[in-house]
Image (cartoon, rainbow, N blue to C red):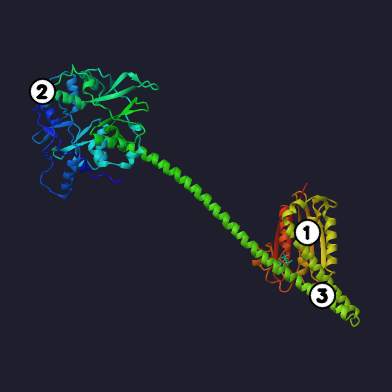
């Protein structure tokens, strides 16, 4: 919010009188319509600002509820409507010089200290005064600042529209019956330090709140006018002088509505009534100004800040959710892409893996059929062995494919039973030797308690180790050694299995990707394979909550170590 130039809030045409002017004359002046106003600070400097200020100042409503007492251009005192009402309430004479009634100990503000309108606002508020004379550095009066002049230049529309009348109105309202004498009203005002009395019919109470229904209002100003007119206040009843009909506001109306209504009706206060027309408070310009005072504003700003903070937190949360959703969508898309890629890899792998052995089998079978008589026995055996090898490879592949397709259901197939690992290792080595047609040198060693039963699902162990053995066989030159070791470590609650070969090895850069489906290292050359076996191995090991470690050096050999927890 842009703060207005404080100079614009100075009313430069207050009623000025000398100390010897009679109180009655001062009253007359205060009540008079100012025809020819003369700015107090119209010394000589005709600058643009001054032009603007004087034209603006003539738009400020007249401040004639006070008079300043000036002597030799110097401020001597101030008298307000309230002082006069107090004086009248005491039954004092109005013919006295104003110098005797005025407030001499004044709070003033020098123009140079009047840096922004809030300085004046807090002085008015702290000292509970309604008029603040502005003087120059030599004490010469420049003008008056009141809550009203500040409000007129401030006009913080937003702030006023945001706040309700009910939040800032005065609820302690002094009211009197229509038959109360005006002099008693003046006394009530003086006693209670209020500037108006609401006139209400005390017999006509609201049904729900038992509050009186207001019918009129009498203000300090009305009392002053009666004084000027020389009316006998001790004989006149409130109902004859009160302002009516009464225009009332509702507590839920905004301060902006109240402000506009005051400007339209040229009044400084409005009565606030509830749903049944019962009296609930009074809203004055001072109340509105309080809503604009720095401390009040601060609390409004704090509330707004809280709202902003809350909304920011909500936004951040929504943003996070959106980011999460975007991430989920991104991952789903990525997964779909990967699946598509896997599908095409799978199809090309399947066609290759089946076509070459099948072509070989068909070719060899045809040869055997056509040239049966011309072939030697050893040639026939060689062809039959080739057909058998190719068929085995295809059978392995089909088994692995079945496993992969069922991998989601692996959980269901996991039944641990007591198993003698020593016997298991010996049997497996035996089977592998037959499968390998004894082309490699197999060595099995068992480290652990003899005849000890460990709980394992033998079928699952076979899936793991058959795959690892067939790789060791496939990727190692014939006549090399393949070592199989089992360590049963009961105390550590685990079994360790090592399969070590002297084969082609695996390049370092490929070692971390070995367990990806269809992944094959680039040193495999023409060795047939699908890249499925280790993916299956890894799935089973994960199922058993185990671990697999690969150590390998190209052209030296590879060791796969499998650590499996013992099931009870
Ligand atoms: P594949 O059908 O290609 O053998 P696997 O999933 O069983 O598929 O193995 C993935 C890759 O890991 C192989 O292609 C090969 O590059 C490498 N590999 C696995 N075991 C060995 C081993 N014992 N020696 C050398 N390389 C191996």
Check mark 3 vs ligand 1: CB closer than 8 Å? yes or no.
Answer: no
* Mark sitting earlier along the chain (2/3): 2
* Residue 362: mark in rendering: 3
What residue does disc 2 label? Answer: 96
Image coordinates for residue 255, horizontal then vertical, percent:
32, 36
Q: Find residue 215 and report its image quarter.
A: top left
Mark 3–mark 1 CB contact (< 8 Å): no
Question: Distance between the Cα atoms at labels 1 and 2?
Answer: 120 Å
What residue does disc 1 label? Answer: 463
* In the foreground, 294 or 52: 52
Ligand 1 quadrant assignment: bottom right
Residue under the image location 76 percent in, 72 percent down: 355
Badge 2: how crowded within 10 Å, few (<14), some, or many (20+)? some
Image coordinates for residue 350, horizontal then vertical, percent:
73, 68
- Above or below, comparing residue 500 to residue 310 in the picture: below
Describe the element under mark 2 as helix, strand or loop: loop
């Amino acid at each position: 919010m842009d703060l207005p130039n404080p100079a614009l809030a100075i009313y430069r045409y207050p009623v000025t009188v000398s100390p010897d002017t009679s109180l009655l004359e001062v009253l007359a002046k205060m009540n008079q319509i100012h025809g020819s106003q003369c700015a107090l600070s119209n010394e000589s400097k005709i600058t643009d600002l001054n032009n603007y200020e004087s034209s603006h100042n003539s738009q400020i409503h007249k401040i004639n509820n006070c008079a300043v007492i000036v002597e030799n251009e110097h401020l001597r005192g101030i008298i307000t409507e309230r002082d006069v009402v107090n004086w009248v309430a005491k039954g004092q004479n109005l013919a006295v010089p104003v110098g005797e009634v005025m407030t001499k100990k004044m709070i003033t503000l020098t123009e140079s200290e009047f840096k922004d309108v809030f300085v004046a606002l807090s002085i008015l508020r702290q000292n509970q005064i309604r008029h603040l004379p502005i003087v120059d550095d030599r004490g010469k009066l420049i003008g008056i600042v009141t809550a009203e002049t500040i409000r007129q230049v401030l006009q913080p529309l937003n702030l006023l529209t945001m706040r309700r009348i009910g939040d800032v109105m005065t609820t302690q309202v002094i009211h009197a019956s229509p038959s109360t004498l005006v002099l008693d009203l003046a006394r009530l005002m003086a006693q209670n330090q209020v500037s108006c009395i609401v006139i209400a019919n005390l017999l006509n109470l609201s049904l729900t709140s038992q509050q009186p229904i207001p019918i009129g209002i009498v203000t300090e100003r009305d009392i002053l006018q009666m004084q000027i007119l020389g009316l006998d206040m001790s004989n006149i009843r409130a109902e004859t002088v009160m302002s009516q009909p009464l225009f009332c506001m509702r507590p839920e109306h905004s301060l902006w509505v109240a402000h506009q209504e005051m400007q339209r009706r040229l009044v400084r206060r409005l009565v606030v009534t509830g749903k049944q027309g019962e009296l609930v408070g009074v809203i004055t310009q001072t109340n509105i100004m309080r809503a604009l005072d720095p401390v009040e504003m601060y609390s409004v700003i704090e509330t707004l800040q809280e709202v902003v903070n809350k909304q920011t937190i909500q936004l951040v949360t929504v943003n996070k959710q959106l980011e999460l959703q975007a991430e989920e969508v991104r991952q789903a898309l990525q997964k779909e892409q990967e699946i598509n890629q896997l599908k095409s890899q799978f199809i090309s792998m399947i066609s290759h893996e089946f076509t070459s052995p099948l072509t070989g089998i068909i070719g060899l079978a045809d040869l055997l059929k056509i040239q049966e008589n011309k072939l030697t026995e050893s040639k026939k055996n060689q062809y039959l062995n080739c057909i058998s090898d190719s068929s085995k490879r295809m059978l392995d592949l089909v088994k692995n494919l079945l496993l992969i397709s069922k991998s989601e259901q692996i959980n269901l197939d996991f039944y641990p039973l007591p198993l003698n690992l020593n016997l298991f290792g010996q049997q497996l080595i035996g089977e592998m030797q037959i499968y390998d047609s004894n082309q490699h040198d197999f060595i099995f060693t068992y480290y652990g308690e003899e005849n000890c039963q460990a709980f394992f699902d033998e079928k699952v162990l076979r899936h793991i180790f058959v795959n690892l053995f067939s790789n060791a066989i496939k990727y190692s030159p014939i006549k090399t050694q393949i070592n199989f070791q089992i360590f049963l470590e009961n105390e550590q609650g685990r079994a360790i299995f090592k399969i070590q070969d002297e084969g082609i090895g695996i390049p370092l850069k490929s070692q971390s990707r070995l367990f990806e489906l269809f992944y094959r290292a680039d040193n495999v050359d023409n060795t047939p394979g699908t890249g499925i076996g280790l993916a299956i191995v890894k799935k089973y090991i994960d199922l058993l909550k185990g671990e697999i470690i690969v150590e390998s050096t190209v052209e030296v050999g590879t060791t796969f170590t499998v650590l499996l927890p013992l099931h009870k």
